[in-house]
Image (cartoon, helix red, strand yellow):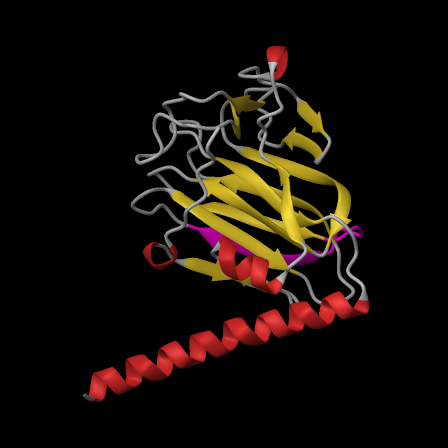
Amino acid sequence: MNKIFYTAVAAFTVIATPANAAVFFSDLTNFQIAAPGAGLIEDFEGVSGAELNTPLPSLSLASGTYTGLAGTPFPNVFVSAPGFTNFGAGNNPTSSQILTANGDESFDVMLAAPTTALGMNLFLNDLGDATITFYDSADNVLGTTTYFASADNLQFVGLVGDPGESIARFTFESTLGRSINTGIDNLYAVTAVPEPATWSFMILGFGLVGGAMRMQRKALAKSSFA
């Protein structure tokens, strides 16, 4: 099935507090430039049968273990089938399978293997914000970012860690998901720890993204004085 993964970078506000040199990205293209080894590791399309549309205490997949945090009602994690109509405006009916929950969509994801970069699509509602927090294997916070409802309620978040850091798990906590569903889809990650040469390419990617942003700011400055 076709997967929805467009982003509306200018249509939302992000509050990010990355640790050390970890960098957040709000679009897939720049995330993959900064982390060239990142590929799709989970789209939830393989979930079927009794696990589909069925709330569970936790869901174990090849990509990791997805566990509900809200507690009430419990169990509460499930993968919604295409055609679901209770997400935020702009996403109904859905055209892909999405990880969500019964009740408040707050869950913890322990990756099957740590990664140096992790990104995903976020499905939000019209009622509040969602906070995503990334942790290393020792449970140290690598970065936290909060997304707010936008016109289409579909956004992207990606984190590329500082050299030497590995993302082992993350949490997703939304506001008022009990009324309108929120969730995640299409997880992208680097499936192996990069070699030194790969880090060089990732640093080059950061430079290219930064250079493009500086050029854009200069162009806007010139146009404002024209």
Magenta span: 136-147
Query: Is 193 covered by the magenta stretch?
Result: no
Q: Nearer the viewer, residue 110 or 6?
A: 6
Q: Is residue 17 above or below residue 66?
A: below
Quarter residue 169 falls in: top right
Q: Residue at x 57, y 63 (%)?
A: 33
Residue 210 placement (x, y as % from top left): 51, 75
Q: Is residue 21 visible?
A: no
Left or right: where does residue 185 sit relative to residue 191?
left
Looking at this view, is 85 or 2 the one in front? 2
Question: What residue is rendered at 48% in x and 49% in y?
Answer: 156
**Residue occupying image coordinates x 60% and y 57%:** 159
Image spot of residue 7 (x, y percent): 41, 50
Q: Residue furthest left?
A: 226
In-front residue for pair 75/53: 53
Q: Is residue 168 visible?
A: yes
Q: Residue 26's x, y, as percent?
A: 48, 57
Which residue does the image show at 56% across and 35% down from the upper left?
106
From what the image shows, is residue 36 above or below residue 85? below
In the drawing, does residue 198 fall left or right of residue 217? right
